[in-house]
Image (cartoon, grey):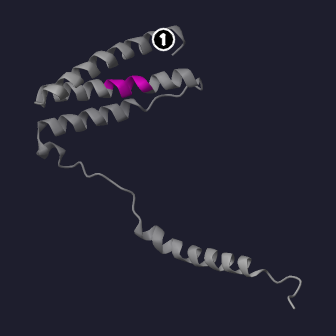
């Protein structure tokens, strides 16, 4: 005869599994490290790699924008440096790349992104950005 407050076997095993998992998490958390990328030797890899790293650093810095509270304005403010980063990277491959298809694609990226940057800049001027 079961006592009135005795948990069922399913609850018992669920609690046992949860406790076992919980006891293992601290050691798991200590062994899992965030993924990092060592870019310290980017310059040593060649001028294109150094240029890509500089372009990425500039884009990431410029994407830190002052938020206005207006989601439309904030989106456009963040997208301009993102698009400029694409333009900068495309120019790098035009300078150092060799594959004709990639070079053609890079030029199309420049053309499209510059047109969009122009539109976004004009939109911000009209909409308080």
Give 7 or 63, whichever is nearer the viewer: 7
Direction bottom: furthest residue: 1
**Residue wearing tag 1:** 123
- Quick check: 105 left or right of 117? left
Coordinates of residue 103 in the picture (x, y in percent): 17, 25
Coordinates of residue 94 in the picture (x, y in percent): 16, 25
- Secondary element under disc 1, as helix, strand or loop, is helix
- Decide whether residue 82 is among the magenta residues: yes
- Quick check: 37 left or right of 125? left
Residue under the image location 67 percent in, 80 percent down: 13
Q: Quadrant of the N terminus?
A: bottom right
Region in magenta: 79-84
Report crowding for label 1: few under 14, some 14 to 19, many 20 or more residues within 10 A (C-alpha): some
Q: Is residue 107 above or below residue 10?
A: above
Coordinates of residue 24 in the picture (x, y in percent): 52, 76
Coordinates of residue 16 in the picture (x, y in percent): 65, 80
Direction right: furthest residue: 4
Residue under the image location 42 percent in, 12 percent down: 119
Q: Is residue 57 above or below residue 72?
A: below
Give 116 or 7, whichever is nearer the viewer: 7
Give the image quarter of residue 43. Answer: top left
Give 107 or 76, whichever is nearer the viewer: 107
Residue under the image location 46 percent in, 71 percent down: 28
Residue under the image location 43 percent in, 32 percent down: 64
């Amino acid at each position: 005869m079961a006592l009135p407050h005795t948990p069922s076997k399913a609850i018992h095993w669920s609690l046992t599994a949860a406790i076992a998992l919980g006891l293992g998490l601290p050691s798991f958390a200590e062994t899992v490290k965030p993924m990092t990328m060592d870019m310290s030797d980017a310059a040593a890899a060649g001028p294109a790699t150094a240029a890509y790293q500089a372009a990425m650093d500039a884009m990431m810095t410029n994407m830190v924008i002052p938020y206005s509270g207006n989601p439309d304005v904030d989106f456009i403010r963040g997208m301009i440096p993102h698009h400029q980063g694409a333009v900068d990277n495309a120019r790098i491959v035009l300078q150092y790349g060799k594959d004709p298809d990639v070079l053609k694609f890079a030029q199309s990226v420049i053309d499209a992104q510059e047109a969009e940057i122009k539109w976004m800049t004009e939109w911000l001027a009209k909409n308080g950005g």
